[in-house]
């Protein structure tokens, strides 16, 4: 059984709200680096980037993290970041769902190699079953579900969030 939690309109509204919160928190920054975790973090990062371009003077550069979710190892970051440019800059790490927090924790571990000023986390959905002490700075929706339920973010012609 699948229950739709957010439809495409809801997702766009959540992304806009997250975008506004990111801008408000980082008003004094000249440049911010966005890292979206593939696959769905890419969609979210791209949508946030579109909103930023229309509504902020802050410069944003977007990257995508390809992580092997089985071994929790970083395959690559696209495009390859320049470590010198990231030093002492704000990084926004974006993913669709924070469940255990493992994907984000391993991504953060890699991002620390760049010596950022700060790493902020943005997620569309936060669940309450984290294994790591991570709290998103920006979230679209917090879901209290059974541990056995699966939250799926479907990004296609009509994006939606489902609980299975």
Image (tube, rainbow, N blue to C red):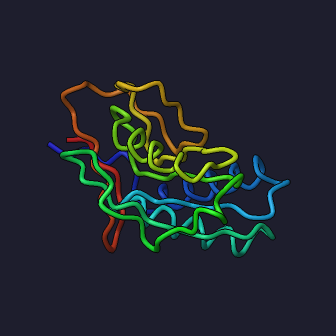
Q: Residue at x 60, y 73 (%)?
A: 50
How far from the left and from the top, in percent, is residue 72?
A: 27, 45
Residue drawn at (60%, 69%) of the image: 49
Q: Position of residue 110 (x, y in %)?
A: 45, 49
In the picture, which quadrant includes the N terminus? top left
User: For this view, does 164 lie left or right of residue 18?
Assistant: left
Above or below residue 144? Residue 38 is below
Using the rendered view, name the quadrant where residue 38 is placed.
Answer: bottom left
Q: Position of residue 45 (x, y in %)?
A: 51, 63
Give coordinates of residue 130: x percent, y percent: 37, 26
Residue at the farthest left position: 1
From this viewpoint, which residue is outermost toward the right?
28
Looking at the rendered structure, the number of numbered marks drawn on it comes to 0
Of residues 85 and 161, the one nearer the viewer is 85
Quadrant containing the C terminus is top left
The residue at 41%/38% (across/down) is 105
The residue lying toward the viewer, choosing from 94 and 71, is 71
Q: Is residue 139 above or below residue 46?
A: above
Left or right of 40? Residue 112 is: right
Name which residue lies at 43% across and 51% down: 95
């Amino acid at each position: 059984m699948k229950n739709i939690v957010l439809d495409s309109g809801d997702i766009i509204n959540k992304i806009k709200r997250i975008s506004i919160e990111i801008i408000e928190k980082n008003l004094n920054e000249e440049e911010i680096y966005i890292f979206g975790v593939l696959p769905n973090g890419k969609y979210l990062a791209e949508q946030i980037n579109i909103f930023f371009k229309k509504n902020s003077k802050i410069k944003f550069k977007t990257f995508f993290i390809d992580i092997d979710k089985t071994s929790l190892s970083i395959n690559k970051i696209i495009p390859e970041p320049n470590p010198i440019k990231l030093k002492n800059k704000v990084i926004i790490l974006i993913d669709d769902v924070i469940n255990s927090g493992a994907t984000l924790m391993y991504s953060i571990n890699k991002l620390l190699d760049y010596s950022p000023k700060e790493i902020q986390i943005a997620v569309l959905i936060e669940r309450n079953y984290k294994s790591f002490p991570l709290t998103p700075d920006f979230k679209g929706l917090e879901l209290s579900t059974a541990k056995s339920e699966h939250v799926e973010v479907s990004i296609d012609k009509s994006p939606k969030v489902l609980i299975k």
